[in-house]
Image: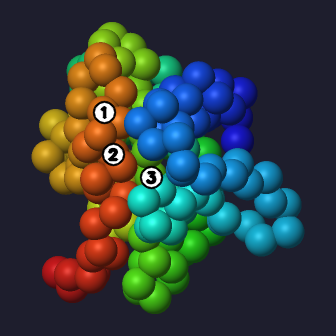
Amino acid sequence: MSMNEAQFWRDVVRRQILRYDPTADLTRIENAVQVGTPDVNGCVRRTDFWLELKNLERAPKKPTPQNPHCIVKLPRYTQAQRLWHRRRGRAGGRTGVLLRIVLPVTEYFYFQWPAAVNQLGNVPIEDLRSVATVYAKSTFPVEALVFALMLPAPKEIEL
């Protein structure tokens, strides 16, 4: 977990979820043995889940020759992490990615595993907003996030 993701965990995720539900159990995972394992394992309201935390300083504002479609790239979102989410999601586990984009205005996104695997890092910011299970500007959406974490694991749709 990068320093910004560690701060995101400490200052926002852990604090907000525990404030919302003091009985929640959250564990930060630092695992060099099993590549791809998400950053957080938790249980809230009798529901077990896994979260990969991603923090991005800035989303692309306008097309560039290197990024003509303004795709939101996550440099540290690895193929091993995508495969982990796919395996766990297909097995029925609740798993996803919680993304914070800091600038120009802080935005929060939660993607259940199919979108986290297939869309994240491959689509423009407008599309990310529409495929997110939870999306919010400025304020961390703790109630919506907890609700989304308790949703049954979705099935992957073949396109």
Task: Give the labeled residue for mark 2.
Answer: 145
Q: Please state the horizontal and vertical placement of residue 12, each as a whole percent of the image.
A: 52, 27
Q: Nearer the viewer, mark 2 or mark 3?
A: 2
Q: Quadrant of residue 6?
A: top right
Identified by mark 1, the residue type is Pro
Q: CA distance from mark 2 to mark 3?
A: 11 Å
Task: Give the labeled residue for mark 1.
Answer: 141
Q: Please state the horizontal and vertical placement of residue 2, each as a whole percent of the image.
A: 70, 35
Q: Nearer the viewer, mark 1 or mark 3?
A: 1
How many residues crowd around disc 1 within 10 Å: few (fewer than 14), some, or many (20 or more)?
Answer: some
Residue found at x 41% / y 36%? 20
Q: CA distance from mark 1 to mark 2?
A: 6 Å
Q: Quadrant of residue 98?
A: top left
Residue found at x 30% / y 74%? 152
Q: Are circles 1 and 2 on residues that touch, CB within 8 Å?
A: yes
Spot the residue most to the right.
33
Q: Is residue 81 left or right of residue 146?
A: right
Q: Secondary structure at mark 2?
A: helix
Residue found at x 60% / y 45%? 76
Residue found at x 42% / y 59%? 45
Quadrant where the N terminus is found in the figure: top right
Is residue 41 visible to us here? yes
Identified by mark 3, the residue type is Val
Task: Give the labeled residue for mark 3.
Answer: 97
Which badge, 2 or 3, is on the more N-terminal residue?
Answer: 3
Identified by mark 2, the residue type is Leu
Which badge, 1 or 3, is on the more N-terminal residue?
Answer: 3
